[in-house]
Image (spheres, rainbow, N blue to C red):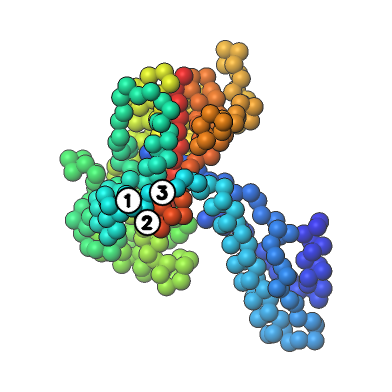
């Protein structure tokens, strides 16, 4: 009611203004922002024209108001998300540049390295494994055009992480049922325009199919009028489509889930597993797999052998013991030490742009 009253005071001449929905902007993390109400935004710069002004002027003014409101709301939401998830650990810029250079050509630049070291600093280690799970985190490898990973450089529609595997992206695009192709685009690529692209792929089969990344990119570019993001919107769409195909070809999500279970089983009591994800699908699986491992179902009460699993009741503040642990969830056979994932600091993102989407989650056994 307060929000409606505020809008009424600001727009007394029956001007309508639609509030745009807030947009929130795999070692592994996930973010959740507080709901932003209209009252939380600053409307002080918005003005509404009176009934004496022409309809055309009113439309222009309302469009201007909506644009200003969208910018303010988006900026406010983004600042809240960043403030809640950013790591506050100082990054050693000199060491990073010394060992990994600043030309972005190094095949592997560690992400959230300081945060990962913090995870194991207080744990007596008998052994330590640093590896990549589930074919994830290959931010440099996927730029390889010869294997079909590059959006901007032509190559075969391959996308196999394991060259010995049989399934290629070309097989999916030219042979899989229509519905399965659409499911890959929608679920693995989270592409809103998936149905239109699916139909164009199916039509391309009538003319010999798709056999190179350039042909697929041309098909996506021709669908740009139906995508958001202006003239360059097709690039974002292409990235999502390529991601979807890569995940499907390598069965990355199932491999990741199985790998996390296998790694946790290998831990000694008190051992920790740190996972860094690089997009929302991976992070979602890491989060849910961790909850499954400690027998928590994500929020509902579950009583098993007299033990109640309700994350809302078992979250504990551990800041005094280890500063990086802010909130944790304790379960039957382990604890999730990162209720909310840890993300890179702004400085790390500046030094290593590939770290932008990295999210770190940690689980401890016993």
How far is mark 1 from mark 3, CA to CA?
Answer: 8 Å
| Secondary structure found at label 3 | loop
Nearer-N-terminus badge (2/1): 1
Q: Which residue is mark 3?
A: 91
Q: Where, quadrant-wise, is the N terminus in this rendering? A: bottom right
User: Rounded to the nearest whole Å, what is the CA distance between mark 2 and mark 1?
Assistant: 8 Å
Q: In this rendering, would 66 be left or right of 99?
A: right
Question: Is residue 305 shown above or below 365?
Answer: above
Helix, strand or loop status at disc 2: helix
According to the picture, the residue beneath numbered tag 2 turns out to be 351
User: Does the rendering let one see residue 24?
Assistant: yes
Tell whether label 1 touches label 2 (CB within 8 Å): yes
From the viewer's side, name the closer residue of 271 and 266: 271
Marks 1/3 in contact by CB < 8 Å: the verdict is yes
Residue sitting at x 59%, y 16%: 307
- Rendered view: 54 above or below 123: below
What element does badge 1 sit on? helix
Are the residues at dot 2 and dot 3 in contact (C-beta closer than 8 Å)? yes
Tag count: 3
Residue 260 x %, y %: 38, 30
Residue occupying image coordinates x 39% and y 66%: 234
The residue labelled by disc 1 is 96
Distance from disc 2 to disc 3, alpha carbons, whole Å, reads 10 Å
Is residue 320 left or right of 185 when viewed as pictured?
Answer: right
């Amino acid at each position: 009611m307060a929000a409606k009253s505020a809008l009424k005071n600001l727009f007394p001449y029956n001007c309508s203004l639609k509030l745009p929905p807030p947009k929130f902007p795999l070692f592994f993390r996930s973010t959740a922002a507080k709901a932003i109400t209209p009252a939380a935004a600053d409307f002080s710069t918005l003005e509404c024209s009176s009934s004496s002004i022409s309809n055309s002027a009113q439309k222009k003014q309302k469009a201007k108001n909506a644009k200003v409101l969208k910018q303010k709301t988006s900026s406010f939401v983004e600042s809240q998300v960043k403030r809640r998830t950013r790591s506050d650990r100082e990054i050693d810029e000199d060491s990073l540049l010394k060992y990994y250079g600043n030309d972005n050509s190094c095949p592997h630049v560690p992400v959230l390295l300081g945060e990962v070291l913090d995870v194991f600093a207080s744990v007596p280690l008998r052994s330590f494994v640093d590896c990549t799970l589930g074919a994830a985190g290959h931010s440099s490898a996927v730029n390889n055009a010869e294997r079909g990973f590059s959006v901007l450089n032509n190559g075969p529609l391959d996308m196999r992480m394991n060259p010995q595997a049989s399934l290629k992206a070309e097989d999916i695009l030219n042979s899989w049922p229509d519905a399965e192709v659409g499911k890959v685009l929608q679920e693995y690529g989270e592409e809103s325009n998936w149905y239109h692209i699916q139909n164009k792929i199916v039509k391309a089969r009538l003319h010999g199919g798709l056999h190179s990344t350039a042909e697929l990119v041309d098909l996506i570019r021709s669908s740009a009028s139906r995508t958001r993001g202006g003239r360059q919107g097709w690039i974002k769409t292409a990235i999502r489509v390529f991601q979807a195909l890569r995940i499907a070809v390598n069965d990355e999500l199932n491999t990741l889930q199985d790998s996390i279970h296998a790694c946790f089983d290998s831990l000694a009591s008190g051992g920790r597993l740190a996972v860094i994800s690089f997009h929302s699908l991976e992070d979602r699986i890491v989060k849910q797999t961790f909850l499954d491992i400690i027998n928590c179902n994500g929020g509902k009460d579950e009583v098993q052998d007299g033990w109640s699993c309700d994350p809302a009741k078992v979250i504990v503040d551990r800041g005094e013991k280890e500063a990086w642990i802010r909130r944790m969830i304790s379960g039957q056979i382990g604890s999730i030490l990162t209720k909310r994932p840890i993300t890179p600091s702004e400085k790390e993102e500046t030094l290593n742009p590939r770290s932008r989407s990295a999210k770190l989650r940690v689980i401890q056994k016993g």
